[in-house]
Amino acid sequence: MKKLAIWFLACIGTFPAWAEGYQVNVLSAKQTGMGHVGTAMKLGAENIHFNPAGLVFLKEHVDLSVGISGIGAKAKYTRDGYTARTDNPVSTPLYAYAGYKIYDNLAAGIGLTTPYGNALKWPKHWAGADLIQDISLKAFVLQPTLSYKITDKLSIGAGVMLAVGNVKLSRALMSTADFQMIGALVGGLPENMVSPEEKAYITGIIRDTKVPPASATLDGKAHVRAGFNIGILYDFSDKVSVGLSYRSRIKMKVKEGEAELNYANRTIEELMGVLGQKVPQLAVPKYDQGTFHAQLPLPSNTTLGVSYRPSDKWELALDLQYVGWNAYDSLNVYFNEEELGIAPIKAKKDYKNTIIARVGAQYKTTDRLFLRAGVYFDQSPIREDNYNPETPGMNKLGMSVGCSFEPYRNLQIDFAFLYIQGIARDGSYTSRNIVTGMEEKFEGRYHSNALTFSWGLAYKF
């Protein structure tokens, strides 16, 4: 029972995404093409996310922007000649922004984004199946925003972030090797517990089983939680602007998560029931009859940006994004039904704060065509000795290109392509064996990469 509870704790708290940790940074097709810079730029309605202080510089009374990305991400695990690869579905983070210029010095807007989430799918029967098989996460953030121009050069902005989300994941309750250990254990039991005929039947089934015998699927929905976003933007001159934005931490809460038990086949389900009756410590707990609650921090982000416009055609930008991952030091899971008899469990995460360095450039070829390019380096918050394959985190290098075309006045179509290359790393994760009760290390080397295509549509009037 404790083993499964520890698994719940670990899985709720670490969601993979292809920015590091479980944060996704593809919330504008235009800015993805520039390496996702934008804190010191005047982006219209998209400033709602990048820096709300810039929203007041809308060129028209209404500015609309919507878009979606397709992320195809892959991860690979290797150890001593063994290799396992993920077969991930395409993830589709989206965004929608609407800005309205109330007065020359005041603007309002609202944004809907998916800044956290992705999908990861390892083979059902891979070596680490008892740590993770598959996981899917999406978090949605709705952000009403106000922006005020104090002077012609100085503006401020603020917004409220309302976040909801859901997660679904699966993990084997024991590995095939653990199941074989159960066979050896049963073979050594006295005849007053298990007869020779029962031993032969049980050990035969176990010997012939080459896949994890049982798995659990966890499904949880996080209720609405609030945070805030503030920013300041200052023009030093017609050519140089500096911006600073802050997005607060949000504690997401799952109040009534549910679990489902799945067996490799009916025979194994019946066998586990028999074993549970004869050897209670081998019983599979009926977690599908109960619920749990837990909470997960979405980290704070502080970003300092500088933009430089050497001519009417060029704009260059640099962003330094500081991510407050140290808020994720541990995670507690509590079971709602007291009759389950499971005490709260605390799991150590010990994430470290990181910096993402971004550089981007935009070139206006004509009044109707803009070209963009960018590069960034994203640090991993995950420490080497606490490395679970449910989040194959590593330092990543991102390289992007993009363009915008204006077929009609004030209507833009945006495209971007982003390639992310993970820098391969070794890692280990310690867990407790469900059969022996001893701690075991799962070690290996991890590789990852991702391709992202983004499309957007913007219109102002």
Image (cartoon, rainbow, N blue to C red):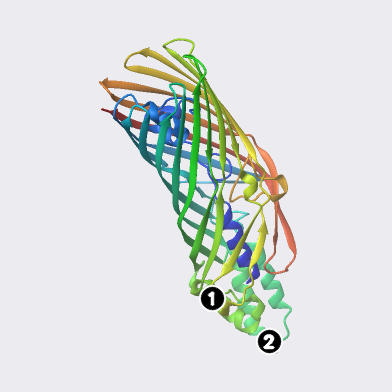
Q: Provide residue 70's location: percent of width, then percent of height.
A: 42, 38
Q: Secondary structure at mark 2?
A: loop
Look at label 2 and name its amino acid: Met
Q: Which residue matches tag 1? A: 337
Determine whether 229 is above or below 316 in the image: below
Q: Which residue matches tag 2? A: 193
The quadrant holding residue 30 is top left
Taking the view exactly as shown, the residue that stands out farthest to the bottom is 192
Taking the view exactly as shown, the residue that stands out farthest to the top is 311
Q: Secondary structure at mark 1?
A: loop
Q: Provide residue 115's location: percent of width, then percent of height.
A: 47, 43
Look at label 1 and name its amino acid: Glu
Label 1 vs label 2, nearer the camera: 1
Cα separation between marks 1 and 2: 31 Å
> Of callouts 1 and 2, which one flags the residue occurring earlier in the amino acid sequence?
2
The quadrant holding residue 76 is top right
- Nearer-the-camera pick, 242 or 89: 242
